[in-house]
Amino acid sequence: MQNRMKFKVSPEIGFDVNNLRAFIEGKVPAIANGSCTYQIIKRSIDARGRTVTVPIEIELVEKGTAARGVKKIQMEADGQDKKKFVVIGAGPAGLYAALRILELGHLPVVLERGKDVQARRRDLAAINKENIVNPDSNYCFGEGGAGTYSDGKLYTRSKKRGSVQRILNSLHAHGAREEILFDAHPHIGTNKLPKLIEEIRQTILDHGGEVHFEAKVNGFIIKEGRAIGVETTKGKIEGAALLLATGHSARDIYRQLSQQKIYIEPKPFALGVRVEHDQNLIDKIQYHCKTDRGPFLPASSYALVHQTFSGNQQRGVFSFCMCPGGFIVPAATSPGEIVVNGMSPSRRDSEFANSGIVVAVNEQDFHQAGWNGPLAGMEFQEGIEQRAFEPGQGTQQAPAQRLGDFVQGKTSSSLLKTSYQPGLVSADLNSVLPEFVADSLKQGFQAFGKKMRGYLSNDAQIVATESRSSAPVKIPRDKETCEHVQIKGLFPCAEGAGYAGGIVSAAMDGEKCAEQMVALYGK
């Protein structure tokens, strides 16, 4: 009997536990008679034809075999001389670096500028309902990082960075649902992530690590070219080495690095808008259904890309962080700016679909806008976000325009219902976005409307600005050791350093940097 088997089933079988079991029992007598059981290895959705199918791969498992998964932590060493390593940032990179340091026999000291994952909720409510932005506790800063309250997507193409399955297994061990181990595009959901993050923190504490909240870094302690500690709002903290995992929005960290003449450089990023459609429209386009997707299929998503020519350059326009059944959220990290992001709850049951649609920008664009030096990209980005703040007259109301009106160069006399809680204000986004970005977006939306009939219309609207797709600064490091090219003992990590984006990619980079750090400074 073969160990693995593949089937193509209907959605009512593929996404219903009982129906699937009955189907497999009918195909595999050994399961029906109880001599073995099975586990799902892969599950995806094939909507290329007129009828949607669900490809599934299963693995037969001997009855009595332990369920798959791993322990929360797998100790590989128990160092007699345990050293402390400082981890700056409690996002996925920082948390998984901390777990890896523990597994390798040493002790992490995790410093997080924001609040614990539950206390963050009050500050998120304040920005949504009262237009109050706490610079240290918001959708980007706080325990769990930017991903905790903005979706929890786990899909990554960064297979060479580390073991994707290892990260997924660990997340499952800490409380994520089993589906993340086999779904083609795994997703946890912003309503489920906080509890999981608390479990990871408890694992760190249970094994001797430390986690300090509201411990903002104000400076780096460098002696004889080596980083040995940091000055924080809670005093001086030193360790054998420092792992810097502060995310793409820690502008004060970039400025501090620049002031202390620690080498950094500008980095290209992407800038654009969030587009919001009715989820039912996207389902009809993607699933070819006449009314709705039915009770079994999940809310559909899309991925779009188009090459344009604008500002004397060829530019990519692409969808980013598509959130089916989701919400648009205010992701500003300072007063006086408008930044939007997207998230989906685990059920993805909102009536809206939203996605970032962004345009590649580069150093030439920064220079033409009047910005130079290592912080040029960040200052360019900051200026656009501040310009987007003006139409809302001091609130977190975001400037918006109906999609068809934007492409045709018309001002929207009214806006649609939205998932964005602070509210929208009608504005000409040509006056908010750089000309080359607006022009590229128009070309992109026209192309997307041809690929997805019904996508380009005035029944959709765009909201500015989607500007935190990645870091606008790079902190260079050695390719092999991950150590900063200039400062020994400093390990720039993940998205904030310009090396990895998304939960799984960042977590893998955190592990990789931790391993190199311990190898160099753990003896």
Image (cartoon, grey):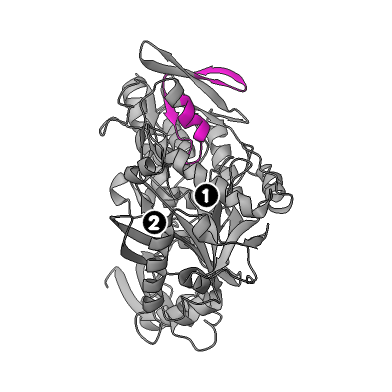
Residue 95 visible somewhere in the drawing: yes
Residue at which label 1 appears = 147
Front of the two marks 2 and 1: 2
Image point 32% across, 27% down: which residue? 483
The one of 462 and 200 positioned closer to us in this rendering: 462
Image: 246 above or below 235: below
Furthest toward the right, the residue is 130
Question: How would you rate the neighbour count of disc 1 (Cα within 10 Å): few for under 14, some for 14-19, many for 20 or more?
Answer: many
Image: 218 above or below 425: above
> Marks 2/1: CA distance?
29 Å
The one of 302 and 154 positioned closer to us in this rendering: 302
Instruction: Give amino acid for label 1.
Output: Gly
Lower position in the chain sequence, tag 2 or tag 1: 1
Residue at which label 2 appears = 436
Q: Quadrant of the N terminus?
A: bottom left
The one of 32 and 170 positioned closer to us in this rendering: 170
- Assess whether residue 254 is covered by the magenta stretch: yes
Quarter of the view holding residue 135: top right
Q: Secondary structure at mark 2?
A: helix
Residue 353 in the image: x percent, y percent? 54, 69
Residue 430 in the image: x percent, y percent? 49, 60
Instruction: Give amino acid for label 2.
Output: Phe
Count the labels in the image. 2
Image point 50% across, 77% down: which residue? 457
Mark carried by residue 129: none
Question: How would you rate the neighbour count of disc 2 (Cα within 10 Å): few for under 14, some for 14-19, many for 20 or more?
Answer: some
Image: 501 above or below 446: above
The one of 54 and 343 positioned closer to us in this rendering: 343
Q: Quadrant of the C terminus?
A: top left
Q: Are marks 2 and 1 in contact (CB under 8 Å)?
A: no
> What's the magenta region?
230-256
